[in-house]
Image: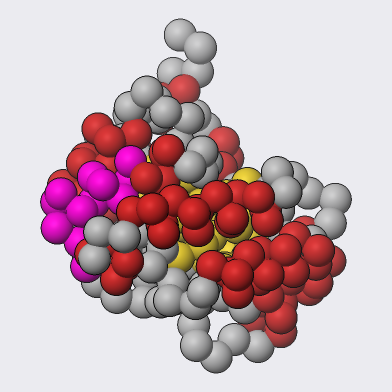
């Protein structure tokens, strides 16, 4: 679990990927989002179309922020070869973190060998770039959430992610199932897709065991840290004490 008492508000920025995923996004909005992500020390700037990768690379140049790119977004129903090509193209354009979408239908049909093969092809195509897999928890049973998470861990993917944000978001209970399922692996949990993401919600998911939040509301959430500390909803900063 992330120890919030050891993090300043600035350091908490690295717990958030700034996500800008509306259906219609202009270049000006992308550039503005990048600058806000820099200002708030976020971990990455994420977007839904590789069209913007060169723009994001330009805006984030000289910073430690990751350049996010979505793969198979948002349905995950493209063939594995198409996703692998999209992955390779994103890396070629400068993406440094990739958010892929699992084929939910394959999981429900228990086509686990097909999923394993697709996950391997994805990791290979990523060429060492940070990888994430979105399992879309809102469409899964409790048992399927656990199975999907275990398959992500088995493939050596860096992060298992709850949602694309296009459908219903995850529950805290979903995330707790994922936390148990990743134990003993190197895979970490990213929460995204929370509807009407209020500041306090983000910290509930972090307390549940997530280590990263993807949200368009990163600015609002981080701006609330001082007030939430005054209220005792998140612990006071103690540094190395």
Residue in the picture at 14% in, 58% down: 141
- Residue 51 sits in quarter: bottom right
Is 145 magenta? The answer is: yes
> Would residue 146 appear left or right of 29 to someone viewing this image?
left
Height in image: 200 above or below 82? above
User: What predominant SS class does the magenta segment belong to?
Assistant: helix
Asked whether the viewer can see residue 43, the reply is: yes
Give how far across and how far down residue 49 sits, in percent: 62, 78
Residue in the picture at 59% in, 86% down: 25
- Residue 229 sits in quarter: top left
Which residue range is magenta in the image?
A: 138-150
Height in image: 16 above or below 83? above
- Residue 29 sits in quarter: bottom right
Residue extending furthest top? 241
> Would residue 12 appear left or right of 226 to someone viewing this image?
right
Closer to us: 175 or 116: 116
């Amino acid at each position: 679990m992330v120890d919030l008492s050891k993090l300043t508000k600035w350091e908490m920025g690295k717990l958030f990927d700034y996500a800008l995923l509306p259906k219609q996004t202009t270049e000006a909005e992308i550039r503005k989002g990048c600058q806000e992500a820099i200002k708030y020390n976020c971990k990455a700037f994420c977007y839904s179309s590789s069209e913007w990768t060169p723009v994001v690379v330009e805006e984030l140049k000289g910073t430690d922020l990751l350049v996010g790119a979505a793969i198979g977004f948002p349905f995950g129903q493209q063939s594995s070869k198409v996703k692998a090509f999209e992955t390779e193209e994103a890396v070629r354009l400068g993406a440094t973190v990739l958010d892929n979408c699992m084929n939910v239908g394959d999981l429900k049909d228990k086509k686990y060998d097909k999923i394993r093969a697709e996950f391997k092809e994805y990791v290979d195509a990523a060429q060492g770039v940070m990888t994430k897999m979105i399992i879309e928890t809102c469409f899964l049973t409790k048992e399927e959430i656990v199975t999907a998470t275990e398959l992500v861990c088995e493939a050596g993917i860096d992060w298992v992610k709850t949602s694309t944000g296009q459908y219903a978001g995850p529950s805290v209970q979903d995330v707790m199932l994922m936390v148990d399922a990743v134990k003993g692996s190197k895979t970490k949990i990213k929460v995204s897709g929370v509807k009407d993401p209020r500041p306090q919600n983000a910290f509930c998911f972090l307390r549940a065991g997530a280590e990263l939040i993807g949200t368009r509301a990163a600015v609002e959430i981080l701006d609330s840290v001082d007030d939430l500390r005054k209220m005792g909803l998140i612990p006071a900063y103690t540094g190395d004490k």
